[in-house]
Amino acid sequence: MLRQVEGSRAVADAVARCRPAVVAAYPISPQTHIVEGLSDLVTTGDLAPCEYLMVESEFGALSACIGASAAGARTYTATSSQGLLFMAEALPNASGLGLPIVMTVANRALGAPINIWNDHSDALSQRDAGWLQLFASSNQEAVDLHLQAFALAERLSVPVMVCMDGFVLTHAMEEIDVPEQDAVDAFLPAFAPRQWLDPDDPVTIGAMVGPGQFTEVKYLMARRQQAALADIAEVAAEFESTFGRESGGLVRPYRIDDAEVVLVAMGSALGTAADVVDALREEGIAAGVLGITCYRPWPHEAVREALRGIPRAIVVNRAIAVGSGSILGQDVRLTASPGTEVHDVVMGLGGRPVTRAGLRQLVLDVLHGRLPRGALHYVDLDETVAADEIAREAEVTVP
Amino acid sequence: MTTTPLYQIGTFAAGNRLLDPDQRSVQSGQDRTNAITSGHRACRGCGEALAARVVLDAASRAAGGRMVTVNATGCLEVFSTPYPESAWQVPWLHSLFGNAAAVASGVSAALRATGRDDIRVVAQAGDGGTVDIGLGCVSGMFERNDDVLFVCYDNQGYMNTGVQRSGATPPAASTATTRPVGTSVGNAFGTGKSLPLIAMAHEIPYVATATVADLHDLEAKVTKAMSMHGARYLHVLVPCPLGWGSASSETIRIARLATRCGLFPVFEAEHGSVTHVTPIRQPVPVTDYLEPQSRFAHLFSGAGRPDVVAALQDRADRNIARYGLLTEETP
């Protein structure tokens, strides 16, 4: 049933209907409304049995989830930005131990300078931590991805991050359908852990592994991540057949079949990009959008297939790798066939809006050859401010 | 003053015979639960291996075998689980260095939420994993009063990484990062960091200290802790022959000297108040404790550093006064 509701509240309700037995979280903007919602649901008994642990840090939050998951409970947490980085030590621990923890990342910039607004720096900085990373393009998809995330995590025994744009999605009020409890129960069976800390059948979890076996453990982990691509597509298909709407999966192409230029992006910018493409098509410009829903594992084949025969791709990066360039753009570059010209642009850092006007201008600039090729282009950079600062720096003498 | 005491308690055979049968240690008995089996790779004379065996066996007995163990990174984790070997006969989980308390809180919450809270949770860490890198998680677990017994095996330094100083390293001790070179007397005289007192400040149900010199006392405290619920903290002094520079055959004697000189007070506290203090029956000067350990050798070589030894004696005397260690009365 469609309800007018805030994205965070809808996610909290969706997570609650997945019946986690343990929620451990530490507040950080813009994740807060999600965990406040869950705290209410546990307090009122609407989510029961469930233990909500109000921990002392994000490191404690993920650590408690590790313990809870190893003890055989369905486990959930949520964070943002620096909070995700405070978990960084525990992220590969959770994936290395194969614990099916689900975490919402309400995407937010990384400081300094401190900035609470949206970009993808937080999640992308942890892209190699061994977690699946699914990016929601809308609040409806954010809700749906949480159901799929628990299903995937438990099927594959890997942890999953559901990434949703901070504020832009988390704090947006809109019509969202949160599937009813019986439908969720049918889609997501009760958690049956592969192994747990059972006194009747003791296991040693987290032993020290030396050079003799370490490579093999990591190889098997990487192999399992690659194999997850098939499961992600399969679970999305199961979801669509159960709930009648398309959500999740690997990539989301929009009007790309005959496109001469395709915008590649993740998250809430995809809706804006689709609007821009519709408008450009009306003007006779064959533009399209390729949304990346599954960022890790990287859907190499699906992206390559989608971009096959496309002359130009513009990758909208909402995070940068300082000292190297783009992050999403690098993946696309390595994937696209030589026939596709890849333009790599940075946009929308630290909450700067990704607007229709901005994307439209970007597409036109690329089509008219006004964008330098081969270099990372900062689309919405105020060059006056940057130039002033560079000039001022040049005048500073070090005593 | 290094005479052998005539009076012994705990697991020593003579002492055991003096006790009622139901009070005797069962460590050497047929019904040992063997939570951690032999064959692990601890150093000879390791105080931590001995303490862990006693603690987990006692806890497992108290829990009727329904127990889960969480372990911080450190010597105990490394020497007990070199894959594919494991010394653990109980369910055992190691995650990271600084998060054992939070992991244990998660285990406890999961068991409660899934209706298996007959299973008890014991977390173990060294002093680094407790008083330094793990303190935030430990304090959070205390403050929430999570149903976890947290045991710190205190060997007063980062022994697993090669004997560096921790927040629990005593003043004047030589470690790999506090060498008595130049004008240094070894580890600085800081303000100290007593985790038992910090635990008591959280007013958790039970806090106790113990050493491997009195295994019967250690067992009794574990059993008592396991009879309670909520956050409980046990701080066990475990001499480390490698890090302390003591003979591997001297572990028990040195632990006993640490209590007899007053540097390591043995006591129990409930809900923030001291309820029992183990009195020192035969006091010794701190020199008796310091001299057999090469980490304090610089205090006694050449002209020696009587001023530093006096400062350490002051610390011991303050403990004796603070906890009333020389009286039978509880302060």
Image (cartoon, coloured by chain):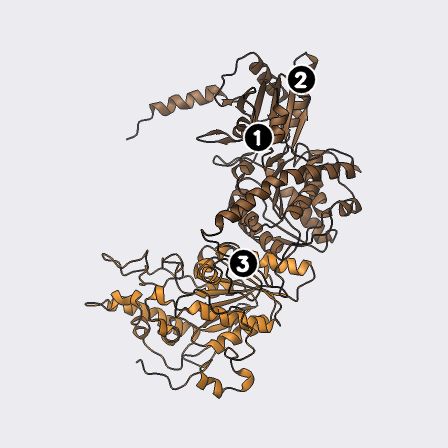
> Badge 3 local density, few (<14 within 10 Å), some, or many (20+)?
many
Q: Which residue is mark 3?
A: B101
Residue sitting at 53 percent across and 67 percent down?
B272
Q: Quadrant of the N terminus of chain B?
A: bottom left
Label 1 close to label 3 by CB (< 8 Å): no
Q: Quadrant of residue B30?
A: bottom right
Numbered mark located on residue B115 in the image: none
How far apart, in angstroms, are the residues tagged by discs 1 and 3? 36 Å
Q: Colour of chain A?
A: brown
Say if A361 sits above or below B191 in the image: above
Q: Which residue is mark 1?
A: A351
The answer to the question of whether label 3 and label 2 lie on touching residues, with beta carbons closer than 8 A, is no
Subunit bearing disc 2: A
Residue B183 in percent (x, y) is at 23, 57
Q: Is residue A162 visible?
A: no
Q: Are marks 1 and 3 on the same chain?
A: no
Please indicate, yes or no, whether residue B282 appears anywhere in the rendered image. Answer: yes
Q: Amino acid at mark 1?
A: Gly
Position in image of residue A23 (x %, y %): 64, 51
Q: Which mark is residue A258?
A: 2
Tell which chain the image draws in orange: B
Q: Number of labelled discs?
A: 3
Looking at this rendering, what residue extends furthest in the left direction? Answer: B303
Task: Tell me the mark number nearer the camera, choosing from 2 and 1.
Answer: 2
**Depth order, front residue of A202/B235:** A202
Examine the rendered structure and indicate whether residue A331 appears above or below residue A197: above
Helix, strand or loop under label 3: helix
Q: Residues within 10 Å of mark 2 (few under 14, many from 20)?
A: few
> Which residue type does callout 2 highlight?
Asp
Q: Tag 2, which secondary structure?
A: loop
Q: Identify the element where label 1 is drawn.
A: helix
Disc 3 residue type (three-letter): Ala
